[in-house]
Amino acid sequence: MSRAEDIFQKLIYFGEDALDEFIAERQTEELFLDFKEAVSDGKKFKTLYKDDRRNLAKAISGFGNSEGGVVVWGVSCARDKEIGDVAKAKVKVKNVHRFLSWLENAISGCTIPSHNKVRNHIISVDENGDGYVATYIPKSDITPLMTTTSSTIYIRSGSNNVPAPYAVIAGMFGKRPQPNIDLLFEDKTLEIIENVDEDILYPKTIDNPPDKYVKISFSIIADNQSDAIAKELYFSANTSETGSEYNKVRFLGYNQMDSISSISGHFNLITKPELRLPPRGKLKFTTVQIILSPFAESDFCFNGVIGAENAMPRDFRFYLSKNDLRSFVAKALKSEDESHILLAEFFSDFLRGNN
């Protein structure tokens, strides 16, 4: 998940609370985030007002030609001499559903070529129909994007969308689309297993192994979200910090990959030379099984990264402190019938992505 998508998902999940947090923490406008007040109120205009349309076009061009970003409509900024523009106050967008419709209708005409992956989401709406909107603009596979309002090609520089220098524009023309590999976790399950012969976790020669364990399984999936063919896809993981001698991380079902020999606690896969992933295609690297025991001696940390040739790598990290590890396993062993809730908790509380 990219940094821009991470911000967008936070706004979807936390709603107006996320805006309050931005304001309380004096969140600055930055490489992936912009705050705007909406001028369009429907009193004098029956479509998106020119100032809002110009801001939207600059954002689509600037974020789309860079690494993506989010525009939050309905937050005013104040200038801080040391750190730049910071979120100051909420200023509700009038008739937010109508404003959303105007945004949707304007997007395709804001740039040449148009950016067809822009998404909008109503953050919150009050009883009067006023509220806040987030616009997510991912990195475009087809660049450069030029605004139709001023025939300018923008890039994101710090907290501003600025006209692209000639050398940057020259580099964009004729550039082949690059793969954009997203990381997915699918086929997620959680179950309680016992140390029995059918699934030998530890030989009986080991002194006093636990009787029951928590087994979390999931698939590591590469999702090609671009118009380019991806090749030389890879997956690497570090599993040296399991939190206990009784804990394990297993990798299964990677027959179509080349496994690269590595040191203990590290695992590396790369696709065979003849394998290519088409646009919008998905590839399963491996099935991961995390085995957790009630005995926690230290923190649990499982780091990984996937990517492909000429694609930005996608990192992930499962981290549980020693206390979190003990608490989660104890809860799972006591609540065997609530596996779906515990599974959701595991991925929401202990998984972090890096962009």
Image (cartoon, grey):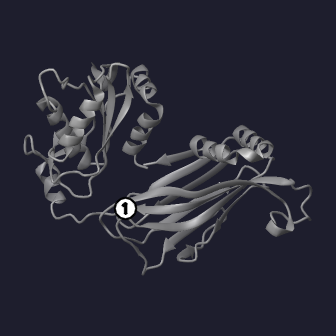
Q: Nearer the viewer, residue 280 or 244?
A: 280
Vertical side of 275 occupied by 216: above or below: above
Horizontal relation, residue 232 to residue 149: left or right: right
Vertical side of 333 occupied by 308: above or below: below
Q: Nearer the viewer, residue 278 or 180?
A: 278
Total label count?
1
Residue at the location (91% across, 64% down)? 204
Q: Nearer the viewer, residue 208 or 59?
A: 59
State the image coordinates of residue 294 (x, y, percent, origin top left).
80, 47
Residue type highlighted by circle 1: Ala
Q: Is residue 298 visible?
A: no
State the image coordinates of residue 274 (x, y, percent, origin top left).
42, 81
State the image coordinates of residue 80 (x, y, percent, origin top left).
30, 20
Q: Residues within 10 Å of mark 1 (few under 14, many from 20)?
A: some
Q: Residue furthest left?
A: 150
Horizontal relation, residue 54 to residue 122: left or right: left
State the image coordinates of residue 340 (x, y, percent, origin top left).
65, 47
Q: Residue furthest bottom?
A: 274
Vertical side of 342 occupied by 144: above or below: below
Q: Quadrant of residue 73?
A: top left
Residue identified by numbered label 1: 311
Q: Is residue 321 visible?
A: yes
Residue at the location (43% across, 20% down)? 24
Residue at the location (29% across, 31% down)? 97
Vertical side of 313 occupied by 138: above or below: above
Horizontal relation, residue 237 to residue 108: left or right: right
Residue at the location (47% across, 57% down)? 183
- Element at label 1: loop
Q: Quadrant of residue 246?
A: bottom right
